[in-house]
Image: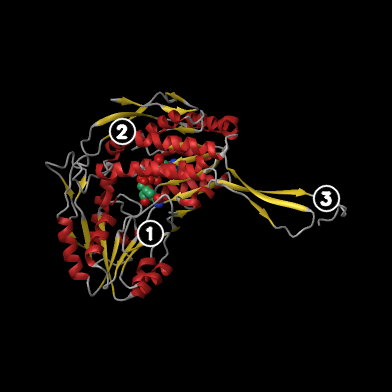
């Protein structure tokens, strides 16, 4: 049994509480590691360490090229530890090994990308409308950044924050989900090994109210980057506002995946499946509302059900498994509650709708892939995020109705469009209220392009050059080039 410690100021420390909590494998139900239960005093220590590191010339005076070299070294260490990081993350959240190993390689790519950007943070000389002054704008780091992340893709979602924050010259305190802390403690170890000065990367583990809230409220913190649910996101946003802190929020979604009659239906079926049954639906970008044009509804549904029935469900550690368990017991219970809610609301369950137990299903934290038809968009099952393998199917007649249904939701994280009509594709892209639109594909992401939400799905963007701006602030510099003879009492 592995017993972890907190990473604060470059040192491994026991939590002030002297308490640890258990972390379990979703498939087997086995407790496999003990995670430190940090509290307010650990949060204070971590922020103070990060603040000292931010002021320390060993970090503050590094050039962008030198910061980039450290990020590159970390990327290389991640590449050398893909198996270890993948297996730790896979044990903790029960995600498919087939997906996790690819995701960890991708995490290394994110660090490579931001390593390259670290010495390309350029200011600008501004053409000022006044004589005898020179003005330029330089971009500076914000200071101490707190990164708070959920359980579904801990390494990836933390990297989306950590890589640009470090490239920009900030220092970071990471607060992982209480369900999946181990992989980020391992990442902290690699950051130390890469040579980041003490306190530049800190990891404190524990629960939202005990350590997350004190981190957000700490006066030395200048930015909070949060990925999680709407409730936590709102609480973090409100707490950060008290200290006028900058925030990035990556929240939930109820994303529409729209299939028109002229689509390549075989491809669209694959897209519908990966959209909502990939990662057992435990992704913010799940295409959980499938909008089918009425003319293809029946044939599409029949083929979709047939394809989903073939899914290999079971042990996520096996490379051939296609659908794994639900990551936490609480989430499993929530999904089942929402399935019952949909039935009560009048939706028709045409596939699944129940837990899976027995041989091959470990400790039984599985839910059968579930499809509902006869869904109205005003039902709660069509409006609220399930974060599980539950698909709602809605019918539409034409493009205008499809767009109206697609946008008629509080969220706006992502959307999919399946059509072979180029004009229709572009029109939908323009009309959809979503931070990402996929045309004839679903769930593609890359470090090179921004990701984030419209409406209740969040604030700010992660990925690409856009993300580094989220960790910088502009300073406008005025330099007099000739003595000023004007009246000092009147602003010129
Ligand atoms: P959650 O909001 O319960 O927890 C996320 C993190 O916030 C955890 O580390 C938790 O301890 C912490 N936290 C909770 N309340 C807090 C508070 N008041 N102050 C400080 N920290 C607090 O989310 P979850 O259940 O772990 O994750 C699932 C949610 O995450 C889903 O709603 C999903 O859509 C969302 N998500 C969004 C994205 C995205 O990029 N938009 C990606 C993945 C997951």
Up/down of 484 relative to 416, above or below: above
Q: Which residue is mark 1?
A: 414
Camera sees residue 75: yes
Image coordinates of residue 193 in percent, x first then y, are: 43, 28
Residue 87 x %, y %: 28, 35
How many marks do you count on the picture? 3
Disc with the residue nearer the chain's start (2 vs 3): 2
Q: Is residue 149 visible?
A: no
Give the label, 2 or 3, closer to the camera: 3
Give the Cα distance between marks 2 and 3.
Answer: 62 Å
Q: Residue at x 26, y 61 (%)?
A: 392
- Looking at the image, residue 367 sits to the left or right of residue 82; the answer is left
Residue 170: percent from left, percent from top: 54, 39
- Residue at the location (60% across, 34% down)? 61
The residue lying at 81 percent from left, 56 percent from top is: 491
Judging depth in this view, the residue of 20 and 435 nearest the camera is: 435
Q: Secondary structure at mark 2?
A: helix
Check disc 2 and report the residue beneath it: 84
211 or 452, nearer to the observer: 452
The crowding category of the residue bearing disc 3, from other C-alpha atoms within 10 Å (few below 14, some 14 to 19, many at least 20), is: few
| The image quadrant in which ligand 1 is located | top left
Q: Quadrant of residue 104?
A: top left
Q: Are marks 2 and 3 in contact (CB under 8 Å)?
A: no
Q: x, y (%) of residue 351?
A: 17, 58
Corner quadrant of residue 157: top left
Foreground mark, 3 or 1?
3
| Mark 2 crowdedness (10 Å alpha carbons): few <14, some 14-19, many ≥20 | some
Q: Helix or strand or loop: what does disc 3 sit on? A: loop
> Residue beneath label 3, please?
482
């Amino acid at each position: 049994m592995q017993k972890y410690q907190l990473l604060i100021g470059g040192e491994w420390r026991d939590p002030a509480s002297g308490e640890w909590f258990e972390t379990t494998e979703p498939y087997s139900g086995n407790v496999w590691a003990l995670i430190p239960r940090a509290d307010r005093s650990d949060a204070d220590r971590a922020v103070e360490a990060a603040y000292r590191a931010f002021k320390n010339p060993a970090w503050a005076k590094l050039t962008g090229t030198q910061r980039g070299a450290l990020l590159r070294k970390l990327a290389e260490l991640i590449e050398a530890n893909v198996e270890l990081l993948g297996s730790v993350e896979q044990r903790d959240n029960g995600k498919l090994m087939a997906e996790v190993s690819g995701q960890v390689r991708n995490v290394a790519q994110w660090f490579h990308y931001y390593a390259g950007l670290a010495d390309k943070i350029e200011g600008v000389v501004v053409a000022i409308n006044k004589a005898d002054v020179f003005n330029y704008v330089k971009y500076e780091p914000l200071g101490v950044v707190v990164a708070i992340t959920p359980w579904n893709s801990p390494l990836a979602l933390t990297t989306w924050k950590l890589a640009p924050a470090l490239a920009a010259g900030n220092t970071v305190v990471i607060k992982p989900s209480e369900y999946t802390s181990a992989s980020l403690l391992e990442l902290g170890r690699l950051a130390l090994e890469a040579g980041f000065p003490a306190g530049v990367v800190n990891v404190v583990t524990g629960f939202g109210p005990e350590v997350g809230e004190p981190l957000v409220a700490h006066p030395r913190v200048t930015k909070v980057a949060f990925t999680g649910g709407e409730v936590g996101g709102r609480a973090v946003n409100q707490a950060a506002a008290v200290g006028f802190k900058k925030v990035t929020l990556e929240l939930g979604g109820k994303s529409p995946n729209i299939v028109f009659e002229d689509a390549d239906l075989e491809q669209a079926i694959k897209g519908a499946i990966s959209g909502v049954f990939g990662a057992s639906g435990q992704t913010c970008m799940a295409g959980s509302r499938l909008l089918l044009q009425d003319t293809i509804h029946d044939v599409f549904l029949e083929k979709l059900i047939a394809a989903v029935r073939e899914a290999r469900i079971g042990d996520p550690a096996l490379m051939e498994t296609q659908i794994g368990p639900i990551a936490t017991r609480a989430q499993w219970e929530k999904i089942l509650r929402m399935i019952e809610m949909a039935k009560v609301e009048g939706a028709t369950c045409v596939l699944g709708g129940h837990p899976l137990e027995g041989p091959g299903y470990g400790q039984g934290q599985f839910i059968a892939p579930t499809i509902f038809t006869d869904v109205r968009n005003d039902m709660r099952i069509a409006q609220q995020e399930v974060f599980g393998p539950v698909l709602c199917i809605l019918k539409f007649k034409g493009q205008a109705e499809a767009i109206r249904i697609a946008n008629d939701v509080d969220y706006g994280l992502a959307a999919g469009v399946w059509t072979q009509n180029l004009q229709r594709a572009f029109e939908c892209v323009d009309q959809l209220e979503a931070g990402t639109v996929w045309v004839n594909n679903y769930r593609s992401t890359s470090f090179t392009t921004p990701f984030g939400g419209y409406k209740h799905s969040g604030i700010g963007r992660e990925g690409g050059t856009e993300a580094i701006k989220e960790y910088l602030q502009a300073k406008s510099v005025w330099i007099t080039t000739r003595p000023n003879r004007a009246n000092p009492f009147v602003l010129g």
